[in-house]
Image: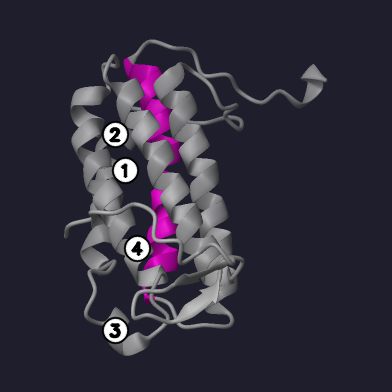
Amino acid sequence: MRIDKVYTKGGDAGETSLIGGERVSKASARIDCYGTVDELNAVVGLLVEALGASQAGPHLIPILRRVQNELFNLGAELACGDAETRAKLPRIEQRHVDGLERDIDAVNDDLPALKSFVLPGGGWPSAYAHLARTVCRRAERLVVALAATDEIGPLDIQYLNRLSDALFVWGRWCSLKDGQPEALWDSRAT
């Protein structure tokens, strides 16, 4: 793929093209979905950068780079309204969901049992993982809404659900590996 020109002026009137050529409003549900997946990918990039100085980095950075590529595949699926064209694109497959489950299991056993909700924080990598988790949950909600009115990939929602779980666990694991205390919710603290 080669991109020579960044601006095309094709979206100056508030519309854009889906993969396959269909023109839609930039305010459409499909655009909102893949735009939020793109935002999630950017936040995962922040997490990767924060992991450069973390004890969790050597383990998580390769996983997160894989996830970023999977998010591009998901974005491509969501950017295509035509089922025939979408079938020819890279897509989220069961192996991607299974991979996230293996990645969760690989670190979850190291973590102490939770007795309360975790407050986002616990060092920069953990904080970015929690931020990514919240963007992932928003993407999931938007994709669920889109699925009620339009066709999406069969595993798109499951993948986002599993990824948000992974980001939660990875955030906790970053705190543990970096020796940062986890702040827990205390309902009496207000």
Q: Tell me the amino acid under the disc marked 3.
A: Thr
Residue 28 picture quarter: bottom right
Q: Which of 120 and 78 is in front in this view?
A: 78
Q: How far apart are marks 3 and 1 (CA)?
A: 33 Å
Which of label 2 and label 4 is nearer to you?
Answer: 4
Q: In this view, does 21 lie above or below 130?
A: below
Label 4 packing within 10 angstroms: few (<14), some (14-19), many (20+) = many
Q: Check disc 4 and report its element: helix, strand or loop.
A: helix
Q: Check disc 1 and report its element: helix, strand or loop.
A: helix
Q: Tell me the amino acid under the disc marked 4.
A: Leu
| Residue contact at pointers 4 and 1, CB within 8 angstroms | no
Q: Which of 20 and 87 is in front in this view?
A: 20
| Residue 171 image position (x, y, % from top left) | 42, 30
Q: Name the residue under label 4.
A: 74
Residue 164 seen in render: no
| Residue contact at pointers 1 and 2, CB within 8 angstroms | yes
Which label was assigned to residue 16?
none
Q: In this view, does 177 lie above or below 65?
A: above
Q: Tell me the amino acid under the disc marked 1.
A: Ile
Q: Name the residue under label 3.
A: 85
Q: Name the residue under label 1.
A: 104
Q: Earlier in the sequence, mark 4 or mark 3?
A: 4
Residue 185 picture quarter: top right
